[in-house]
Image: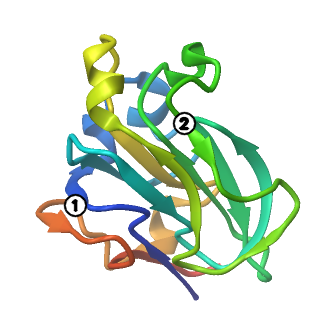
Amino acid sequence: MTQVLAPFEGRVLALQDVPDPVFADALVGPGVAIDPLRAPADVVSPVSGKLVKLHPHAFVVVTEAGSGVLVHLGIDTVELKGEGFRLHAEEGSTVTAGQRIVSWNPAEVEAGGRSPICPVVALEAKPEQLSELIQSGVVQAGAPLFTWSV
């Protein structure tokens, strides 16, 4: 069992409400999304493990059990080429749940015409492997989002 935590504060949405069909249709895996506060924020790791991919707009942490969790900061933010994001970790490093990975400003993303909604996805999981999904309400950074049974 892996407990996946909120990487930052915001309003939780069902994954199907993400304005991108790849995430909304759960093509990379099930999960939830967070609509962040429109203020500068630190983004923390949702699980402990190895930071296997780190881009300014997205990262993947794989737990010891082999569960990969993707945090994607906004939609179409790859087009920003890192502008407006600040990295605080290195790809390949071991991180702990709650450790700061990236800083960003969702208001700037939105001002640039992009959605700041952030999918938090259990990569390659089956929907029935997730339980205790929070799909509405406001969460704080580090609060439980869902449990993943591997």
Left or right placement of residue 133 versus residue 97 in this view: left
Q: Which residue is mark 1?
A: 135
| Residue 105 visible to an observer of this rendering | yes
Image position of 131 with respect to 128: above or below: below
From the image, which quarter does the N terminus lie in? bottom right
Image position of 37 with respect to 22: above or below: below
Confirm or deny contact between disc 2 and disc 1 (CB under 8 A): no
Which quadrant holds residue 143? bottom left
Where disc 2 sits, the SS reads loop
Q: Position of residue 17 (x, y in %)?
A: 25, 36
Q: Inspect the image, locate mark 1, and give the three-letter code of the amino acid beneath it.
A: Gln
Distance from Cα at disc 2 to Cα at disc 1: 26 Å
Q: Residues within 10 Å of mark 2 (few under 14, many from 20)?
A: many
Which of 128/118 is in front?
118
Which quadrant holds residue 21? top left
Q: Which residue is mark 2?
A: 85
Where disc 1 sits, the SS reads loop
Q: Inspect the image, locate mark 2, and give the three-letter code of the amino acid beneath it.
A: Phe
Q: Position of residue 104 (x, y in %)?
A: 44, 41
Image position of 134 with respect to 59: above or below: below
Q: List the single residue furthest toward the left.
A: 137
